[in-house]
Image (tube, rainbow, N blue to C red):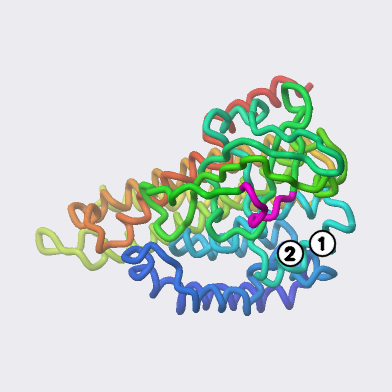
């Protein structure tokens, strides 16, 4: 699945212009109001951003992973909340249906995802099950042709906006094999949303708890129609999501570096621009080298991802995805730290973008698998290989 080169080049140029002319100027509004302007969301729908990864047969654009990371790099060059509006929707929110769903499920949900009519969220994390996803406690008990779901999901991105959830619940015994993946309508009786989380950064993104009390979901809403496959679906979905977080991290690093270069040229101390001092140049050089290394890694892994069947899990590709997420998200943290340092006292003031990006970048090392989880995946796979 990929868009032809000419059409993709036009799309990428359009996204670059949209980021530069519409999103970057709205960053101050976002920071002040903690909300993405509805007019911008409508423009995102018109540009087809809600359908980037949905195949053309379901009304989307149908980008390959290699193309998707290029788009996410550009979207990473502004506040993460803008991408979050649709990124979860076309990523971990709906990828489970695309990868493992039945033909009927794909036909029912994917066209509405692509148009932006339906916002989907990914509900895996729980109060006692985040990194250890196989130990989740939300239960799904079979009752006739429905399952009855009870439990609490935590830190669910876009939950306040969601029309449906890709939700993991336990239908069987302990461990990964007892987990199933459900499509759950957000308006089903018994679903309650907690208050919006107040986060360190990424203002404008919406996360909260999702509480399920005797929520009845048709058995036909198990993704793929087969119980016990939910953990495998989740891991495949997270692989693609982690790769796109890596691309977004590289885009954010490039924006921070641009802001730092600009400030180093303009700010004067001791009668000359601070960019003329070698220690400032050294920080800029380290950031540039790490950014280029991370971006090269992300693109190489994306090509490998495109080369594997989407319905299969490839441990070697998963390991390389973890390498990309580990390096890129840690890298942007270092670039953000240097950016603040180059700005000096101004870097600690909210009026400057680097202060906001410093806080925004911190989350990238945590969600969709912490750095430590990526280390475990990489180490385990290295020891398994001959």
Q: Mark 2 highlights which residue?
A: 63
In the rendered image, the residue lying farthest to the left is 270
- In screen coordinates, is 234 left or right of 103? left
Count the numbered circles shown: 2
Q: Earlier in the sequence, mark 2 or mark 1?
A: 1
Q: Residue at x 68, y 44 (%)?
A: 215
Q: Residue at x 32, y 48 (%)?
A: 338
Q: Which residues are magenta?
A: 183-190
For the residue pair 118 and 192, the one nearer the viewer reads as 192
Q: Horizontal and vertical percent for residue 250?
A: 51, 54
For the residue pair 334 and 289, the one nearer the viewer reads as 334
Taking the magenta stretch, the answer to whether it contains residue 184 is yes
Please identify the quarter of the rendering in which residue 72 is found: bottom right
Q: Mark 1 highlights which residue?
A: 1
- In screen coordinates, is 131 left or right of 206? right
Main SS category, magenta section = loop
What is the number of the mark on residue 92? none
């Amino acid at each position: 699945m990929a868009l032809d080169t000419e059409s993709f080049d036009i799309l990428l140029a359009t996204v670059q212009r949209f980021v530069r002319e519409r999103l970057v100027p709205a960053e101050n509004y976002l920071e002040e109001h903690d909300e993405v302007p509805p007019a911008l969301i409508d423009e995102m729908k018109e540009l087809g951003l809600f359908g980037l990864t949905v195949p053309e047969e379901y009304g989307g654009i149908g980008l390959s992973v290699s193309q998707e990371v290029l788009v996410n790099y550009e979207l990473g060059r502004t506040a993460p909340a803008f991408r979050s509006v649709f990124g979860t929707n076309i990523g971990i929110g709906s990828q489970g249906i695309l990868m493992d769903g039945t033909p009927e499920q794909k036909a029912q949900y994917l066209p509405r995802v692509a148009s932006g009519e339906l916002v989907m969220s990914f509900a895996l994390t729980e109060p006692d099950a985040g990194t250890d996803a196989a130990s989740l406690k939300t239960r799904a008990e079979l009752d006739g042709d429905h399952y009855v779901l009870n439990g609490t999901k935590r830190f669910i991105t876009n939950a306040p906006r969601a029309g449906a959830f890709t939700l993991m619940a336990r239908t069987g015994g302990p461990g990964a094999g007892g987990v199933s993946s459900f499509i759950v309508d957000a308006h089903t009786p018994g679903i309650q949303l907690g208050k919006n989380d107040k986060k360190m950064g990424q203002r404008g993104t919406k996360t909260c708890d999702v509480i399920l009390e005797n929520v009845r979901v048709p058995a036909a809403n198990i993704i793929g129609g087969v119980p016990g496959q939910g953990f495998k679906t989740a891991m495949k979905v997270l692989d693609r999501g982690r790769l796109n977080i890596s691309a977004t991290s590289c885009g954010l690093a490039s924006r921070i570096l641009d802001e730092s270069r600009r400030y180093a040229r303009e700010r004067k101390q001791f009668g000359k621009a601070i960019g003329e001092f070698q220690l400032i140049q050294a920080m800029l050089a380290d950031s540039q080298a790490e950014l280029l290394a991370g971006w090269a890694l992300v693109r190489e892994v994306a090509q490998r991802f495109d080369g594997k069947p989407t319905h299969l899990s490839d441990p070697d590709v998963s390991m390389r995805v973890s390498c990309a997420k580990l390096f890129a998200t840690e890298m942007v943290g270092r670039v953000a730290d240097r950016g603040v340092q180059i700005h000096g006292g101004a870097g600690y003031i909210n009026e400057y973008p680097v202060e906001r990006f410093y806080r925004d970048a911190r989350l990238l090392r945590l969600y969709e698998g912490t750095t430590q989880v990526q280390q475990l995946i990489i180490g385990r796979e290295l020891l398994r290989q001959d």
